[in-house]
Amino acid sequence: MVFKPISRYSLVNAKVRAKLSNLLPDELIGRLAETRDEEGFYSALSGTVYEGVFSRPEIAIDPRIAEKLMLEKEIIWHMELLKDLRGNVRELVSHFLEKYEIENIKAVLRIRLRTGCDDNLEYIADTGLPNSIPYRGLIEAPTMEDALSLLEGTPYITPAFAALDDYKERKTLFPIETSMEIDYYKRLKGKVEKLDRRDRQIARRLIGIEIDQKNLNWLMRLKFYYDIPVADLLDYNIPGGSSLDRSKLIKVFQCESIENSLSIALEQFLGKASGFFAGSKQGGKLYILEIILWNYLVSEARKTLGGFPFTIGTILAYLILKRAEVRNLITILNGKVLGMKREDIEEHLRVLF
């Protein structure tokens, strides 16, 4: 029995371990946060796997191009894994690419409502993604119904239209965005259940933490920013979380403040992270929640790398760590563009608590 996973993962495991060796060390992330400006940031990444991105002349004119190029590199690295995967494992890893498309659709629909201008489409990273989505058409369509109809032939049209009435009533894109993501995770769960027992257990745990992160973030925003009743809050819930089931979420939402709600939620499955949140001077800001939950996911990914190597855990851990790294770089770059101080930038970085 042990030879089957070794055979399945031996080639991809060797390649992923090599990729893991290219992750940027923590001290370099610290130096990047210290750099004086964008030019210093670009220079500090010379000799890394990101050198090709930051040596491009166009980013000196428009740093937002750098963000797009980094996301495209992330997508390409993701797609490279598929070459050495087969069967249910390949289907699962391939499914993750849809998350980039959902983020793109969300961004374009926001552009549509905010400006109606397609100039920002040049910042959309869609290289090699699984579906052909007419982003320009989403912006230019005369009505939201017309825009969503352009998603025909993709997995996103059904959940998007299912939330259309809620969108019209609440006058926010949140129902459409969450409906697409809930559908994405439901389909992802189906792919997880097709895995072998060991892989299934690992995937449930890591993806479950991400679902907890998503559920808590969504529902806290709805409760404290949209004033939606608890009964309705649970309509925006992805099944399959690691530690926060519906009954626990109900208890969290009975609290009257963000601080108390999050302290209870974090104590239930993050332990010392709740103490970090309670002691933060900016505890009422939800980005603190996002960083804490991201850090926990990164921590669990690193623990997974210390286990039996010939499982899907090595692949999932790599994808999580690479995603955290790219978002750290985007955070630092945006901080440099905005002239933020190092300590302010570091508050927003995904680092282990």
Image (cartoon, rainbow, N blue to C red):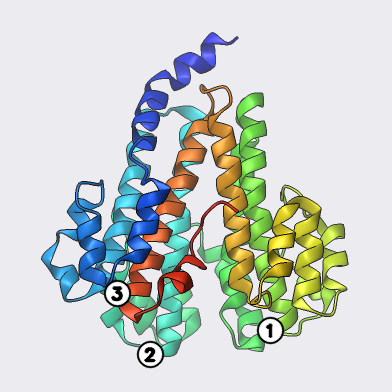
Compared with 95, 2 (above or below) is above
Say which residue label 1 marks: 225
Residue at 30% of width from left, 66% of height from top?
35
Label of residue 351 in the image? none
Say which residue label 3 marks: 121
Say which residue label 2 marks: 115
Q: Do the residues labelled 2 and 1 touch (CB within 8 Å)?
A: no
User: Which residue type does callout 1 highlight?
Assistant: Tyr
Compared with 19, 211 (above or below) is below
48 horizontally vs 96: left or right = left
Compared with 212, 251 (above or below) is below
Residue at 57% of width from left, 64% of height from top?
180
Q: Nearer the viewer, mark 3 or mark 1?
A: 1
Label 1 secondary element: helix
**Quarter holding residue 134:** bottom left
Residue at 49% of width from left, 82% of height from top?
144
User: Which residue type does callout 3 highlight?
Assistant: Leu
Q: Nearer the viewer, residue 120 or 295?
A: 295
Q: Is residue 267 visible?
A: yes
- The mark that comes first in sequence, 2 or 1, is 2
19 horizontally vs 272: left or right = left
